[in-house]
Image (tube, coloured by chain):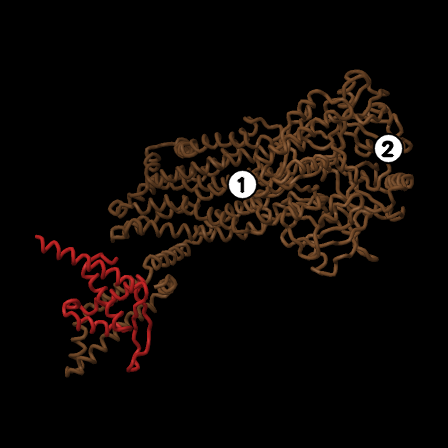
Chain colours: A red, B brown
């Protein structure tokens, strides 16, 4: 699932990174954080974040729970769990080795 | 996400929908609030938030698919759809479920018996380490060899136990026996219990622990005066004493001897023999000491436990030399043994089989009939499946338009297949549940047929996981069997043709023919089998026993006199006979040793002066005067016994014709003398007509009758016009008047005793016959359905023929030809199958050839009658078709 397409993988990594660095958050918060980091990733549609969240929840990387937030609104809060951390680490390593490989190719071309 | 949440989501998709909507709404509202904060108007803020978010419905749908088992939801949908479909057509549903549940019930019932008798291991630790010992049965000339014998003498047991050394332990178990028991204390009732003698290490070897008190130990080994103790079974302890722990140490009287209760064996253990529930165990060391040295008293079964690492083959190789040594000793002992017999004893080998299921006489007797019945039940199941398949097929053809529409609207082939299979599974599930209930009732009823008071058979029919698994497996496989082909047919519908009403018809007929062929083949097997068993039962019932069993009541009498009061014992027995004979409506009375046809048998070799002992052992039976008259066996020559005849040598003896013919040929046997192999001399004082002694299958055997001897228990035969119950009440009064504790232990009739020897045959004939009828009816319904359909399809053709002037007879012929084509293949296969079945069941048939023209002829006739009835209605319908109506129909 992880490598089915690179845009999806990039979005997954982005979400996992945000959840692991900034702690649990609702979908809206994640969407804002993504926008801060990269204007591009969600240029298409904000809503496409939700199927991605649900897919990762399905894969067991993140867990979700309905909670009451600061301004007494109910929100579905996502948090990263151990499988997600592991996935993020593996994906980061893969990305690093891939990018060094590409860099080497470009240097020697 | 856990599968549980997914299941919850699938079961309640609306909640999931709300959940998703809430989450998205929350996002949109937060975004709008933020935008409003930047100064946008509320409506503009909402518009922009939605714009940025994108296709709300699309994302929701995408998430929804992710968060529930779409497949599972589909299954529920299918189930709901199938359920509605069945409700729409209740007659179809009821027919299918009924015919399947009968078949599944029959299979489960018989399988649960097979399981209890043959498959379920003993409830002891490591049952796979247990083994039983057998020897090939020594064959008697003139008596068919019946396989292996599992009984050993006590001396041989000791030798084998020694020879096994440290590679295995061997324990000894006597056959479970009925005994009269009485608890100590005034007025305690007498009860009939099942007792079993075991070697003191029996429990330890099996790994059975006490539930209360202690079990046998080395203390019971102390010859010559072991402790008189018994161990109760948990089941008896609960049933009789309501699990009262105070019974320990109480005393119990068994056949006049007092024992104290030592302990109770652990729950669930009811003896090493499936089919028998032992109530109490006694140490073998308490029996008659004569058996410890007598190598000819072979009555004990041996059950061993392998030491870790040892195999059965190793055990056999260790035991064989000891066994051989024992046989040599037997040959060298006593009177010279015929050479054929010597050779046989020398060549005999000892065999070790798995003892995981314990020892069982019941299993040996009934394993073949049970497997046959299971096979027959499977035939019924296949017929039922074929029947349901053709019903489904008919329905799917009727719905071919609907199917075609769905295919053309884009339904996937797999989806349609799944839906049809769901329907079959639903039918199978309902039938399985009905069948399960049916089996719960039927299995004990079946056991009841083969059980009786003097030889009770009780099986633990608790439906365990194995039976449940079997039931589920046959349900599922039958659902696939009957559901797959019609489903395939339906899913493969070609929309264009179907919508024009021309698809599937030829295919339906072809498939239908296949199903009818299967039904015909199996039903024919069942009918032949049923006919074979019924005919052989009739043949057995027609056997001339040599006595007239009708109206003879057989009572087992006993009293309280001690073994030393022989004279009083004899007088009491003779008084009993005389008083019984004088009762009103009684035409004859006689006493004897244990009743004929009860399985008891005393046999010895016959030695004629100056000749070798006979190769066969002959039956010696003790009877009183009046025995031949009471049983209506003609006395051909010489005299009957008198009350003064006794065992003084030469013992006066009445032999039957078979005996006289075998040992004296054409010469007159009257007045001649012979010896038994123990040296006792006999003089023949009378010749009786031939009669059967213990079974109906083999011809009348030679019997030597001797005068009665005083004994505590004896058999009283009474010929009367009254029923057994009234006779017993009269005898009870007379017995009480005689005193000395004279009483009836058991009442039965001679007809019952004779009937009991053909129990297997009755069981097979009864159930086989019933199954044959069931199979025949199902096959007839199948044929009727298909012919009816074929006539409907050919209405136009027949109409044209009729319009062109065809007579009725040729029109009948058209249908009959169709019928013949339909069943010819099935009949051929069925014939081959039934011949194979008869071969397998040969040992259970009597007076039936392997290819018996009567059986096959009858079966064929019955079958053709059924086919004609099934075909008659459609044929009449075809012949009655009005050409004008038929043509207008198109």
Query: Which chain is mark 2 on?
Result: B
Residue B718's quadrant in the figure? top right
Q: Please rate how many residues cluster around mark 1, counting C-alpha atoms within 10 Å: few if below 14, some from 14 to 19, many from 20.
A: many
Residue B373 visible in rendering: yes
Q: Is residue A109 above or below residue B13?
A: above
Q: Which mark is residue B669?
A: none
| Pointer 1 residue | B374
As drawn, is B32 to the left or to the right of B478? left
As drawn, is B271 to the left or to the right of B709? left
Q: Earlier in the sequence, mark 1 or mark 2?
A: 1
The CA distance from mark 1 to mark 2 is: 49 Å
| Pointer 2 residue | B625
Q: Position of residue B132 (x, y in %)?
A: 62, 39
Residue at left offset 74%, top offset 34%: B297
Disc 2 element: loop
Residue B38's quadrant in the figure? bottom left
Residue at left offset 79%, top offset 42%: B555
Q: Using the image as rendered, state which of residue B48 and residue B281 is in the foreground.
A: B281
Q: Is residue B118 above or below residue B842?
A: below
Residue B534 visible in rendering: no
Query: Which chain is mark 1 on?
Result: B
Q: Position of residue B560 (x, y in %)?
A: 86, 47
Q: Using the image as rendered, state which of residue A36 and residue B193 is in the foreground.
A: A36
Q: Position of residue B20 (x, y in %)?
A: 29, 69
Residue at left offset 26%, top offset 64%: B61
Q: Is residue B647 above or below residue B576?
A: above
Q: Please rate how many residues cluster around mark 2, counting C-alpha atoms within 10 Å: few if below 14, some from 14 to 19, many from 20.
A: many
As drawn, is B560 to the left or to the right of B830? right
């Amino acid at each position: 699932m992880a490598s089915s397409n690179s845009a999806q993988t990039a979005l997954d990594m982005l979400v996992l990174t945000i959840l692991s660095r900034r702690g649990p958050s609702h979908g809206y918060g994640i969407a804002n954080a993504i926008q801060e980091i990269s204007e591009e990733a969600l240029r298409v549609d904000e809503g496409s974040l939700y199927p991605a969240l649900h897919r990762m929840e399905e894969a067991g990387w993140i867990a979700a729970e309905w909670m009451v937030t600061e301004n007494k609104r109910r929100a579905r809060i996502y948090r990263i769990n151990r499988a997600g951390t592991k996935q993020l680490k593996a994906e980061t390593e893969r990305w690093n080795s891939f990018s060094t490989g590409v860099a080497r190719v470009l240097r020697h071309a | 996400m856990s599968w549980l949440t997914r299941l919850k989501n699938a079961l309640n998709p609306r909640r999931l929908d709300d959940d998703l909507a809430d989450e998205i709404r929350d996002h949109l509202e937060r975004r709008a609030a933020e935008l409003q904060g930047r100064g946008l108007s509320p409506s503009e803020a909402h518009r922009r938030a939605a714009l940025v978010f994108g296709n709300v419905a699309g994302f929701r749908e995408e998430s929804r698919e992710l968060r529930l088992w779409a497949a599972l939801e589909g299954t529920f949908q299918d189930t709901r759809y199938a359920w509605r479909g069945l409700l729409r057509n209740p007659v179809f549903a009821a027919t299918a479920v009924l015919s399947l549940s009968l078949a599944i019930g029959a299979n489960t019932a018989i399988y649960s018996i097979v399981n209890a008798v043959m498959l379920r291991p003993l409830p002891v630790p490591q049952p796979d380490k247990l083994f039983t010992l057998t020897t090939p049965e020594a064959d008697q000339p003139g008596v068919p060899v019946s396989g292996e014998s599992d009984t050993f003498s006590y001396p041989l047991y000791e030798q084998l136990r020694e020879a096994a050394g440290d590679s295995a332990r061997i324990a000894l178990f006597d056959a479970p026996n009925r005994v009269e028991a009485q608890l100590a204390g005034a007025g305690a009732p007498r009860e009939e219990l099942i007792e079993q003698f075991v070697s003191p290490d029996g429990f330890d070897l099996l790994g059975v622990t006490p539930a209360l008190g202690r079990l046998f130990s080395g203390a019971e080994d102390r010859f010559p005066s072991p402790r008189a103790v018994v161990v109760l079974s948990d089941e008896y302890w609960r049933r009789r004493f309501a699990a009262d722990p105070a019974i320990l140490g109480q005393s119990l009287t068994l056949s006049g001897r007092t024992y104290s209760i030592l302990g109770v064996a652990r729950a669930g253990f009811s003896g090493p023999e499936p089919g028998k529930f032992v109530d109490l165990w006694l140490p073998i060391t308490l029996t008659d000491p004569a058996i410890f040295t007598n190598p000819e008293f072979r009555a004990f079964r041996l059950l061993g436990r392998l030491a870790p690492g040892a195999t059965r083959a190793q055990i056999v190789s260790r035991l064989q030399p000891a066994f051989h040594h024992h046989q040599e000793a037997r040959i060298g002992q006593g009177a010279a043994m015929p050479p054929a017999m010597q050779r046989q004893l020398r060549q005999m080998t000892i065999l070790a089989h798995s003892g995981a299921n314990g020892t069982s006489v019941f299993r040996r007797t009934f394993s073949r009939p049970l497997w046959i019945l299971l096979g027959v039940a499977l035939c019924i199941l296949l017929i039922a499946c074929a029947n349901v398949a053709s019903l489904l097929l008919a329905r799917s053809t009727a719905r071919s338009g609907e199917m075609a529409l769905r295919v053309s609207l884009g339904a996937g082939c797999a989806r349609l297949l799944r839906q049809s299979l769901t329907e079959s599974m639903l039918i199978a599930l309902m039938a399985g549940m009905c069948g399960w209930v049916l089996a719960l009732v039927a299995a004990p009823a079946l056991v009841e047929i083969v059980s009786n008071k003097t030889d009770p058979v009780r099986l633990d029919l608790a439906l365990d996981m194995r039976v449940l698994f079997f039931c589920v497996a046959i349900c599922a496989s039958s659902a696939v069997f009957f559901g797959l082909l019609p489903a395939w047919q339906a899913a493969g519908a070609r929309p264009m043709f179907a919508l024009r009403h021309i698809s599937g018809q030829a295919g339906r007929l072809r498939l239908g023919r296949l199903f009818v062929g299967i039904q015909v083949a199996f039903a024919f097997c069942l009918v032949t089998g049923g006919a074979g068993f019924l005919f052989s039962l009739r043949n057995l019932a027609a056997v001339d026993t040599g006595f007239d069993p009708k109206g003879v009541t057989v009572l087992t009498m006993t009293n309280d006199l001690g073994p030393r009061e022989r004279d009083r014992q004899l007088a009491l027995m003779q008084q009993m006979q005389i008083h019984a004979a004088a009762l009103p409506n009684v035409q004859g009375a006689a006493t004897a040793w244990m009743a004929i046809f009860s399985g008891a048998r005393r046999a010895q070799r016959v030695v004629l002066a100056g000749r070798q002992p006979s190769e066969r052992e002959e039956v010696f039976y003790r009877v009183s005067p009046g025995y031949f008259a009471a049983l209506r066996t003609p006395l051909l020559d010489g005299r009957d016994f008198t009350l003064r005849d006794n065992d003084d040598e030469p013992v006066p003896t009445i032999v039957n014709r078979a005996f006289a013919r075998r040992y004296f040929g054409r010469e007159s046997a009257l007045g001649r003398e012979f010896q038994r192999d123990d040296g006792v001399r006999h003089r023949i004082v009378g010749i009786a007509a031939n009669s059967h002694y213990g079974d109906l299958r083999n011809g009348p055997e030679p019997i030597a009758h001797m005068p009665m001897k005083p004994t505590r228990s004896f058999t009283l035969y009474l010929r009367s016009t009254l029923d057994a119950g009234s006779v017993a009440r009269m005898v009870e009064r007379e017995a009480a008047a005689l005193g000395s504790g004279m009483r009836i232990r058991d009442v039965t009739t001679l007809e019952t005793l004779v009937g009991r020897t053909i129990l297997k045959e009755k069981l097979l004939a009864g159930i086989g016959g019933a199954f044959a009828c069931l199979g025949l009816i199902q096959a007839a319904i199948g044929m009727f359905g298909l012919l009816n359909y074929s006539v409907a399809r050919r209405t136009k053709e027949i109409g044209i023929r009729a319009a062109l002037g065809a007579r009725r007879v040729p029109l009948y012929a058209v249908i009959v030809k169709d019928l013949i084509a339909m069943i010819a293949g099935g009949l051929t296969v069925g014939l081959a199958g039934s011949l194979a079945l008869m071969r397998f069941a040969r040992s259970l048939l009597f007076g039936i050839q392997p290819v018996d023209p009567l059986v096959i002829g009858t079966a064929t006739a019955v079958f053709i009658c059924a086919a004609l009835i099934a075909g008659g209605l459609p044929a009449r319908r075809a012949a009655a078709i009005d050409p004008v109506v038929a043509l207008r129909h198109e």
